[in-house]
Image (cartoon, rainbow, N blue to C red):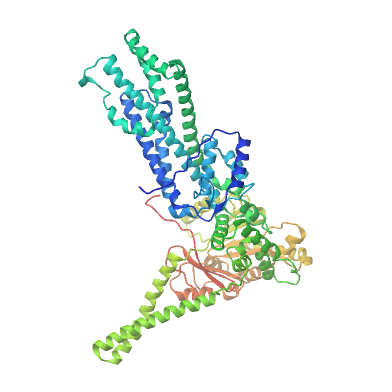
Amino acid sequence: MKQYRVLNITGVVLEKYQLEKYLEQLASDQILKENSDKNTYPIYRMKENFEIITEVYHLLNEHIKLQIPIHPAGEWILDNYYIIEETVKWIEKELTLKKYTDFLGVANGAHRGFARVYVLATEIVAYTDSKISTKNIKDLLKAYQQKKTLSMDEIWNMGMFLQIAIIENIRGICERIYSAQVQKYKVENIIERLVENKAKEELQFKNISAYRSKVNEYGEMKYPFIEYMSYKLKRFGKKAYPFLNILEEQVDKMGTDISDVIKKEHFDIAVKKVSIGNCITSIKVLQRINFIDIFEQINEVDDILKKDPIGIYEKMDYKTKIEYRNTIKQISRKTKISEIYIAKKCLELAENSTKGETQDNLTTEERQRINIKSHIGYYLIDDGKNKLLEELQNKKIKKVSGNQKIRLYILTKTILAFIISILIGSYLYHQTGKIIIAIISAILIYIPTEIIIIQIIQYIFGRVIKPKLIPKMDFQNGVPEEFATFVVIPTILSNKEKVEEILKKLEVYNLANQSDNLYFDIILKDDREKITNIFKNLMKEIEKRKELFANYNGDYKRYCMGSGNALPMLVIIVNNYEAFSELYDEFQDTLITLTRDGQRYGITFIISTSGVNSIRYKLSQNFKEIIALSLNDKADYLSVLGNTNNVFPSKSFGRGIIRINDKVCEFQTAYFIYFGGS
């Protein structure tokens, strides 16, 4: 067993106000250091604690079979042992030594070297008698942060350290239970031998020696012995009076009496029962608590990010928020700068991005670019990250452009393939002595060698480089009115079965995506009138918006920001463009006009197609964002996106590439896996 230090904090139960003041004082007194010490790693102690809890669990089961009364606190152990076991396994897996030592450590006092979050969690458990709730966690952590700020990692892992501290308390209670049960066993042994006068071979309770080592380790408790012996002797009546008198005499020598001993023991039993109940209940509570809510309420970094100048951060889904916060955490570790300072600097850059700039006479794209720079995410996961790092480190950071990376990639694979081909050609020349054969072989080998090198490089990149998260908005509670969407599904109904199939799909789409601002419809073969009306209404809407936007440079976003009117953005989705163009070829020119003019007035088109060359050139020129999923070969990608700057998706399921203006990126989509009927 490795040598390790034990964090031992005991205290009386404090009122909430008292504990908050104590934690404020604790924060003021603590001096912190960059890392925790390895010899304070709590997993070794937790394993030892669990071994003792397990031993007590087995002892209690054994005593139930022997019909020895169980300590009331032991009943909680018997009923909830599986919860403790699952918690220990989870913590052991989750808290690695590397992760623990990365936490800030305490640099002064009795708890020097321990992780600050571990000390804080143990203090909270000690002074609340392990009684934890969502509200008191929030309030106590806020009290501590009045004097010192907790890092995001510390807040996020507070629940785990609270459970470690609770398991330590359970171990202490189990030691008391063990000693009490052994004393009862000892009483049963004495009763059998002296009161019932059983022969040696008839004795049931004769394994006293098996318990002695543990009794010595945990400390021998006299009060449980006296209380249980008194109880057993009284049940035998006159027959046990001599033994009862001896017991009273021995208790008198201790300066007390049996009645007082029984009261104290019963009080201790009640206290231990309440404590173990608090421990088990708190573990269950901690496993149910949504720490995302607690984190967002008490984390100062999150409070700063919520001040996003364009108000987007609060509307994002929790995975995107986690990505933003994790980026700040990584920058903090790399630069040794406070997470709070980094978040404030990020907010400052976003707020200053539009200062001194006028949006008059700017194109829609230029205005969008300015708005993007006003979002905090631009400085965390986009091109503005280098600017943030420059501000933090006060030095110029050289940025490697996408084209430079591509050139380096092409140069690397070409040189490696060339060297390997030359080596193989040289080997063949030395073996055969024929220069022509060696040259031809080297040329023929070059192409397959390059393909193998590309696959190896892509495999390494796939393992080493973390995929980029695409930021998403949170529409879990429905699509807001300003993002209202109409989904149109063009289809050909060739037979009755096709009608039933498409109606079922439409019902599934609608039920799976119920929202007041999300609409589904089908365009059938004879729906020319419906399409005509839709396109006419869209053309009218464009004319109407032209008049509305006249004083705002004819721009949708500028109108919404300047007038204060949240005019809905219209999104038209044409799914299966091949079917649409085959059935309604006469609408092609109208569609080209709408896709060209609609962008400026808040009308966006999304068109999907399964064919490589099915979209007309004039129509494709109106789209600046083009997405391609898995295609047959590289030529198909070039046909769809034009020049991809040698960026192609790997063969992994769900991979694709997207062109946004002139930038091409690889991305990963979610995809379903079928498990035999599931």
Name the outermost residue toward the left. 201
In this view, the residue farthest toward the top is 238
From the viewer's perspective, is 321 left or right of 60?
A: right
Residue 625 vs residue 506, the one in the foreground: 625
Tell me: 559 left or right of 507. Answer: right
Judge from the rendering whether residue 140 lies leftward or rightward of residue 548; answer left or right: left
Q: Nearer the viewer, residue 428 or 392?
A: 392
Q: Nearer the viewer, residue 225 or 370?
A: 225
Q: Residue at x 49, y 67 (%)?
A: 656
Residue 233 seen by the camera: yes
Q: Is residue 517 in view? A: no
Task: List x then y, in percent, for residue 399.
Answer: 57, 73
Q: On the picture, is 636 further left or further right than 207? A: right
The image quarter in which residue 290 lies: top right
Q: Single out the residue that lies furthest toward the right.
A: 551
**Residue visible at 31% across and 83% down in the picture:** 424
Residue 481 vs 400, above or below: the answer is above
Position of residue 76 measured from the top left corner of the image (x, y, whole percent)? 43, 31
Percent across and percent down for residue 6 are 44, 43
**Residue 526: x %, y % from top left:** 57, 61
Question: Does residue 572 lie above or below 456 as drawn?
Answer: above
Residue 313 against residue 420 in the figure, above or below: above
Number of marks: 0
